[in-house]
């Protein structure tokens, strides 16, 4: 089942926490790569300022998505102001339309 994890940064602490826990965050994502269909930073309109993160996971149930999120280093460190986890159904799927480079 697919779940979207939608995380909004807490603007009061985001930069300091992001810098302090970036390596742990990336290692956690790598360790769980088999669950992650798509993920990335949410950006302000300037294309540079991070305002949150979104992940789409393929897991068996909501409890598994919640456990993944609860143990993610940025969340454990208090980076996010809010986290929403929602089940979704795949309808359109056009990965060939996605940008091929990482910004």
Image (tube, rainbow, N blue to C red):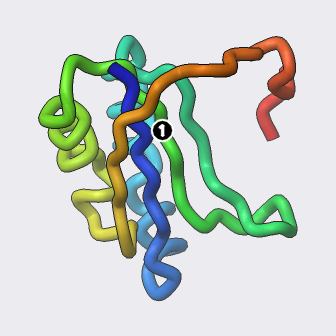
Q: Quadrant of residue 60?
A: top left
Would residue 39 be found to the left or right of residue 94 on screen? Answer: left
| Quarter occupied by the N terminus | top left
Residue under the point 41% across and 68% down: 17
Residue under the point 41% across and 62% down: 20
**Is the residue 16 above or below the residue 48 in the image?**
below
Most foreground residue, 27 or 4: 4
Q: Residues within 10 Å of mark 1 (few under 14, many from 20)?
A: some
Q: Where is residue 35 in the image (x, y as percent from the top left)?
A: 36, 18
Most foreground residue, 22 or 96: 96
Residue under the point 36% across and 44% down: 86
Furthest toward the bottom, the residue is 12
**Mark 1 falls on what kind of element?**
strand
Would residue 88 be found to the left or right of residue 51 on screen? Answer: left
Q: In which quarter of the image is residue 25?
A: top left
Residue under the point 33% across and 33% down: 28
Please give the residue where the numbered disc 1 appears in the rendered image: 55
Most foreground residue, 11 or 37: 37
Q: Position of residue 3 (x, y in %)?
A: 37, 33
Most foreground residue, 40 or 85: 85
Q: Quadrant of residue 47?
A: bottom right
Q: How many numbered callouts?
A: 1
**Is the residue 66 above or below the residue 99 in the image?**
below
| Quarter occupied by the C terminus | top right
Would residue 71 be found to the left or right of residue 14 on screen? Answer: left
């Amino acid at each position: 089942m697919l779940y979207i994890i939608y995380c909004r940064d807490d603007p009061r602490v985001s930069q300091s926490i992001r810098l302090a826990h970036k390596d742990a965050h990336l290692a956690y994502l790598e360790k769980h790569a088999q669950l992650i269909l798509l993920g990335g930073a949410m950006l302000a309109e300037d294309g540079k300022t991070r305002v949150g993160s979104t992940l789409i996971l393929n897991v068996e149930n909501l409890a598994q998505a919640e456990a993944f999120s609860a143990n993610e280093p940025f969340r454990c460190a208090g980076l996010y102001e809010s986290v929403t986890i929602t089940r979704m159904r795949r309808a359109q799927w056009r990965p060939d339309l996605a940008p091929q480079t990482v910004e």
